[in-house]
Amino acid sequence: MRGRATPRELLDTLDGKLSRLGQAGASALLTAAAVFTVVGAHFLIRYLQGAPVRAMSVVQLVVEMTVVIFPMILYARRVIAELDRSRSKLAALGRRLEVAAEQAHQANRAKSQFLANMSHELRTPLNAIMGFSEVMKDQHLGPVNNPRYLSYAKDIHTSGRYLLGIINDILDLSKIESGKMSLDSAEEFDFLTTIEASLAMIESLGAKFEVTLVNQVAPCGVRLLAVERMVRQILINLVGNAIKFTPAGGTVTLTGRRLACGGYELTVADSGIGMSEEEIILALTPFGQISNMMSARHAGTGLGLPLAAAMMELHGGALAITSQPNCGTVVLLTFPASRVREARTQKVA
């Protein structure tokens, strides 16, 4: 059984009935009610004072009140009507936004599922291409007498590895977006060792573009509880990007420090061309490509930074970028205290 109506419901009911009379009719009715109330109060006050009520003064009071109150009430009714229309429009807009948000969410899930399925379908034939081209370039089944064929096999294998890397990035990003990427394989490992191994893997890229890699992360005995493959990929993506967008003769520097809260902060700073605020937003968007004098020299899919940020978020950490055009870029990785462990002490026999 329904309880009593709330004051808001009573007011809405009254307003609905008044609206049927139109703005002028509702205003006239409210004006009459106000005049009647004031005249009644006037009679009551005069009666309590024992003073006579003069008809002329009552008429004058009615006229003055009508002239003053009617325009005010008419204007108020128009404002109320406009507010009601605005409220209805906002309610309709809110419903459309909810539907649009749900449709966008469903489309994003479908996109992630499609990319994941496509990646799986592409990896099988791609592995075969890489395997056969490796057999050919390494001449496992006998010498390849034509040097051009041997060169083609090397190009096929190199291109296949590059394409496989892109597919793996797309697959990882799709898994993270769909919530299927887990940290079940997380384990403790020495963070400095992983940093050094990651830099060793990408050192040749720095030499190719004449960019110096400087590792200033001091031995601190910090161990991370994380998926080492992901952390290594984060470092390779960040340092690789820094190298690609740093002119020859520049530097990419890594520094680290333990935070008071127990977390750990790693900084990747370069002396490259930098980015504007708008370009930072674009760089963190999947498949976002920044157009500048350096981007034309390097092929890419725009997945490096978004994937690194997603993997950091998956670990409960954060990736932040500060940069200005022609002033270099600083990428800050923050690992939470829950992921940081102290070095294990060696027991003396």
Image (cartoon, helix red, strand yellow):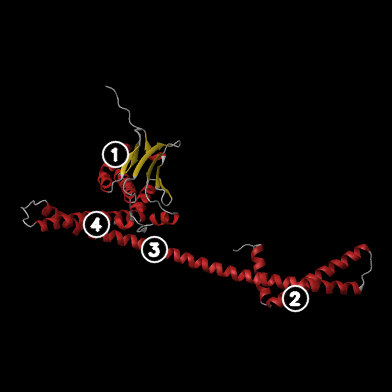
Q: Residue at image x 31%, y 42%?
A: 213
Residue that mark 1 sits on: 196
Residue that mark 2 sits on: 28
Earlier residue among tags 3 and 2: 2
Q: Residue at image x 59%, y 67%?
A: 87
Q: Which type of secondary structure does the marked residue at label 1 adopt? A: helix
Is residue 194 placed above or below 161 in the rendered structure? above
Q: Residues within 10 Å of mark 4 (few under 14, many from 20)?
A: some
Residue that mark 3 sits on: 106
Q: Residues within 10 Å of mark 1 (few under 14, many from 20)?
A: few
Looking at the rendered structure, the kind of residue marked 1 is: Glu
Q: Is residue 35 visible?
A: yes
**Viewer-side label of 2, 1:** 1
Q: Residue at image x 17%, y 55%?
A: 157
**Viewer-side label of 1, 3:** 1
Is 89 positioned to the left or the right of 102 in the image?
right
Q: CA distance from mark 4 to mark 1?
A: 26 Å
Q: Position of residue 135 (x, y in %)?
A: 11, 53
Looking at the rendered structure, the kind of residue marked 3 is: Gln
Earlier residue among tags 2 and 4: 2
Q: CA distance from mark 3 to mark 2?
A: 53 Å
